[in-house]
Image (cartoon, rainbow, N blue to C red):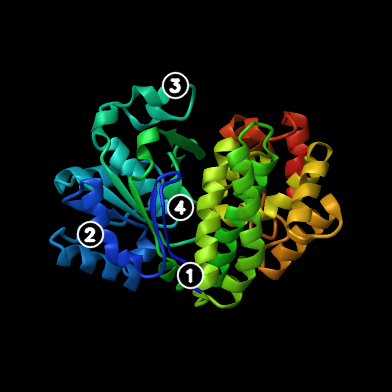
Amino acid sequence: MSITANWSYPTAIRFGAGRIKEIADACAVAGIKKPLLVTDRGLATMDITTKTLDLLDDAGLGRALFCDVDPNPNEMNAEAGVTAYTEGGHDGVIAFGGGSGLDLGKLVAFLAGQTRPLWDFEDIGDWWTRADADAIAPIVAVPTTAGTGSEVGRASVITNSITAEKKIIFHPKILPSVVICDPELTVSMPNFITAGTGLDAFAHCVEAFCSPYYHPMSQGMALEGMRLVKEYLPRAYADGCDIEARAHMMSAAAMGATAFQKGLGAIHALSHPIGAMYHTHHGTTNAVCMPAVLQFNRPAITDLMGQAARYLNIEGGFDGFCAYVDAMNTSLGIPKGLTDLGIKNLDVDRVVAGALKDPSTGGNPIAMTRENTTKLLMACL
């Protein structure tokens, strides 16, 4: 089965196996003549990165690489990336990798031309208007995992290393100009990353679907994204070289991130402070928290998740959907709770405080308070 397409929602996406070969042309379309490829340390020496740099070099675009990116990137990574960008005389960024490489790459392109400090652009009110939009460098995004969907996002998640808080930096112009979704780049993902990133996409779809805000386009996209994960994540997990499954999972990732323009909720509100404080894998943390959050939101989403269950051919309505989530987590090796995830001596008060401050909190279908969020967090243990 051939899966190839050209999409322009939410941005221009070149989708299909082997399309990384178009990286130089993607740069030309974005107006980039001297790109800086930003990725994480783990990907820096992998074949997919080396071959991409070769393609750039052969096209006369150089092979500049910045890879000082932590799994949960922070302001120190951002500062180092901006220095590399400026000193190298670059005119655009190729954000390459999973969520960390994509988010940090987008942030470097955003910050390189700004004069105000990073935290002045946190996603609060209209703070994004403080940025000089004309100084934001063009971005080409190349995901190498299928989960975060940051390649189609207008924000970057960045950890404040001083306060151990995850912050969101938003601006409409950090939506990449061109995205290359090549499922061949994902075949080398180890199983635990395939599972964690895939369930991150599923969490995006579930929370967007349950968000009380109005956005019917996102609602439909979230529902179909759930179906793609249900059908194809087990296949990608069982056989990493299953290109059809890898392709559909890349679609689900982009769909989830597009859908959550409608809102996120308690899953992400919890996983953001937990990840910032305990350095856990984001998607895996989402998966661990999901069963408890579904039960927490039960009074508000029973009928809605019943609709989703029918679309996904899951029997039993809300309870059947929850049972499916439990079984899927088990089949993909997801820990049963935060303790099994490796978190010892959880600072409950601090995590709850972080969750209540997180922007995702507002999209939860049941209002989150200190009391009920504490009970929810304990249920995640």
Q: Tell me where residue 107 sits by quadrant.
A: top left
Q: Which residue is mark 1?
A: 189
Which structural element holds mark 1?
loop
Residue 311 place in picture, x, y as percent: 74, 55
The first of marks 4 and 3 along the sequence is 4
Give the alpha-carbon distance from disc 2 to disc 1, as whole Å. Answer: 24 Å
Q: Which residue is mark 3?
A: 126
Give the alpha-carbon distance from disc 2 to disc 3, as whole Å. Answer: 35 Å
Which structural element holds mark 3?
loop
Q: Is residue 353 left or right of residue 141?
A: right
Q: Tell me where residue 62 sits by quadrant.
A: bottom left
For mark 4, does the 10 Å Cα neighbourhood hold few (<14), some (14 to 19), or many (20 or more) residues?
many
Give the alpha-carbon distance from disc 2 to disc 4, as whole Å. Answer: 22 Å
Q: Is residue 302 above or below residue 123?
A: below
Which residue is painted at 20% across and 57% down in the image? 64
Give the alpha-carbon distance from disc 4 to disc 1, as whole Å. Answer: 14 Å
Q: Are marks 2 and 3 in contact (CB under 8 Å)?
A: no
The first of marks 2 and 4 along the sequence is 2
Q: Which residue is mark 4?
A: 99
Give the alpha-carbon distance from disc 4 to disc 3, as whole Å. Answer: 25 Å
Residue 254 place in picture, x, y as percent: 50, 52
Q: Amino acid at mark 2?
A: Ala
Which residue is painted at 87% across and 56% down in the image? 316
